[in-house]
Amino acid sequence: MHESVQDYYGQQLTSNEDLQTSACCDQTPPDHLKPLLSQLHDDILARYYGCGLVAPAALEGARVLDLGCGAGRDVYLLSALVGETGEVVGVDMTDEQLEVARRYQDYHRQQFGFAESNVRFLHGYLEQLDELPLDAGYFDVVISNCVINLCTDKPAVLNSVKRLLKPGGEFYFSDVYADRRIPEHLKADPVLYGECLSGALYWNDFQNLGKACGFADPRLVESRRLEINNADIEAKLGNARFYSATYRLFNIDELEPACEDYGQAVIYQGSLDDHPNGFLLNEHHYIETGKVFPVCGNTWLMLERSRFREHFRFIGDFSTHYGIFPGCGLSIPFTDDTESGSEDGGCC
């Protein structure tokens, strides 16, 4: 399957206009990212095949790893966001994509006014990250954009991400998920696989995989239904529905399997650039500036142990346990009628 994906993205696709479905097409970027995207070279933008936005807050000075970087659109966007004191490393297995990415390295250094480039690109397989010159515990953030579904050994990828992240670091990534398990015979179809569909995980299998690899509490940031817009492909897929979703997984060993209530709360100070009025941790946690926001123990740790710590005030500790956090329970993501969580504090 590696060879099939390399052929699809190296030979069959010359730009995102060659895609046969809308699966690898992301959303309209927020206003604060538009000026940076306008500085990227047109050749880089034309070869972009992402399904979401992977530019979380608080990246100044961060070390970021992009898994499946392709021609480098996200690498160069993040290059501007981390600044000259930060670093972005892109990994991809497709030579043609990496050639384009490297061709414009100095172009983007000049665009952002840097004395030296803060990016580098490595050729390699995401299932074999341990064979690349990447140090354990080195990265603040690992990102990926519509690539994990293409990997043939997804547990190996997540285990490597856990190893490469600093304590308190996060895996912030967008990918395609299905509302059911995809039949094995469809995974052998090179077009369905290359279009990021037949390799997509059933959402519950992903959540269980994340927990098995040490990410105890996966948090869904946002999701949207994908329209396939190709009658032949839709016929092959049957009743399966697909969603683009962005998750954040924190490398915090103390996280619990469920949202436990310790009587804690946080107050966001409005100090993150481009987020003066509130901070979105995940779909059920939009924390307004200055408001006392009750949280479960896991949410408290995600904010207190991560790069977000300086932007919050923390109330409480873990000395008294009050049971399960109100509203905690198994929820089904990606459904068309999913209700949003409470903005006054709520379970993930």
Image (cartoon, helix red, strand yellow):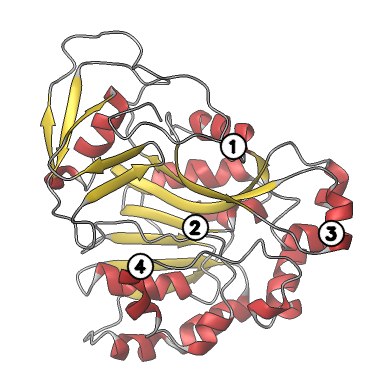
Which residue appears at 20% of the width and 52% of the height? Answer: 277
Residue type beneath disc 3: Ile
The numbered mark, 4 or 1, whose residue comes first in the sequence reads: 4
> Which label was assigned to residue 233?
3
Please state the horizontal and vertical placement of residue 323, each as a whole percent of the image.
Answer: 32, 8
Please state the horizontal and vertical placement of residue 68, each as a whole percent of the image.
Answer: 54, 63
Is label 4 in contact with label 1 (beta carbons under 8 Å)? Answer: no
Alpha carbons under labels 2 and 4: distance apart: 12 Å
The numbered mark, 1 or 2, whose residue comes first in the sequence reads: 2
Alpha carbons under labels 4 and 3: distance apart: 36 Å
> Which label was assigned to residue 144?
2
Is label 1 in contact with label 2 (beta carbons under 8 Å)? Answer: no
The secondary structure type at the circle numbered 4 is strand
Front: mark 4 or 3: 3
Crowding at mark 2 (Cα within 10 Å: few <14, some 14-19, many 20+)? many
For this view, does 141 lie left or right of residue 85?
right
Which residue appears at 16% of the width and 45% of the height? Answer: 289
How many marks the image carries: the answer is: 4
Q: Return the residue at label 1.
A: 337
Q: Quadrant of residue 233?
A: bottom right
- Residue 1 can be seen in this image: no
Alpha carbons under labels 4 and 1: distance apart: 38 Å
